[in-house]
Image (spheres, grey):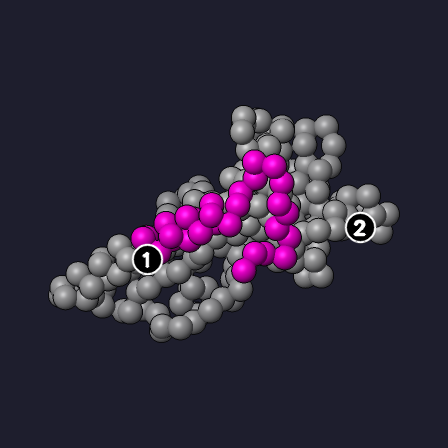
Amino acid sequence: RLRGNYEEVDKGPTRKDIAAYYAACTAVDDQIGRLRKAIAQSSQAEDTAMFFFSDHGDMLGSHGLRLKRKPYEESIRVPGIVHYPKVMKQGRVSENLFSHIDIPATTLGLCSITPPSGFQGLDLSKAITGKSSKTRKDAFFQIFGPYAGDATIAGWRGVRTDRYMFATYIDKPWVLFDLETDPFQRNNLIGDASARSYVLPQLEKRLADYMKA
């Protein structure tokens, strides 16, 4: 079943390409299964923390695009699974934002080690284990320049909150999506007067704060 925003374009991803992608996912799942089986047979099963995530997604034809480096959910939203029987219950689902930069600090936190002062990323170990509601309010993204072959035409920076995705080029805003009402990111609100008055200034300030930090 194709995603609701899939667009068939010349030389774009086809059903065969998408099937191959899912075949690769299945192959990864098989290897994770082998690892989990080996760990289960060891004496360390209860005290082994496993993180499962991807570095990026793939457009796979959504918006008629391919590959990564786009400010779209298909490119930036990836699986995030943590398994650590010693400190957390199985089956818990959290809608909290979690960025790759948080993985080192969170790993230390799960090991009861305080991250060093000035360490990048947040320790979200207590949020993951359900002991705290503390989470990040947004996540930062940036691509420094164009990349041949994947339709990334220029460098951009962006910020994703629990509701909005905003990205800007160096000289102009690019996209603003309300993910609550527009999960497939079909309606770019950059030109909407109301959004520009109320939502955009907040996101631009947050993005500037990230760049300054």
Vertical order, 161 against 94 (above or below): above
Local crowd size for mark 2, using a 10 Å CA cut-off: few (<14), some (14–19), many (≥20): some
Residue at image position (36%, 72%) is: 90
Q: Quadrant of the N terminus?
A: bottom right
List the residue tagged with mark 1. Answer: 29
Q: Nearer the viewer, residue 56 or 133?
A: 56
- Left or right of 189 on screen, residue 44: left
- Where is residue 140 drawn, in percent x and y? 56, 43
Look at the image and tell me whether residue 84 can be seen: yes
Q: Residue at the location (77% across, 44% down)? A: 190
- Image location of residue 47, percent across then percent down: 23, 64
Quick one: quadrant of the C terminus? top right
In this rendering, the answer to whether 67 lies above or below 129 is above
- Of badges 1 and 2, nearer the viewer stands 1
Question: Which circle marks residue 131 in the picture?
Answer: none
147 or 198, which is in the foreground? 147
Give coordinates of residue 117: x percent, y percent: 41, 44
Question: Which residue: 77% across, 48% down?
Answer: 189
16 drawn magenta: yes
* Crowd band around label 1 with a 10 angstrom C-alpha radius: few (<14), some (14–19), many (20+): few
Identify the secondary structure beneath mark 1: helix
Can residue 160 be seen from the camera position used here?
no
The residue to which callout 2 is attached is 195
Between the residue at mark 1 and the residue at mark 2, the CA separation in whole angstroms equals 41 Å
Placement of 211 over or under 93, stated as above or below: above
Residue 125, x across and y down, in percent: 40, 60
**Residue type highlighted by circle 2:** Ala
For the record, the magenta segment spans 1-29
Q: Quadrant of residue 157?
A: top right
Precedes in sequence: disc 1 or disc 2:
1
Q: Amino acid at mark 1?
A: Asp
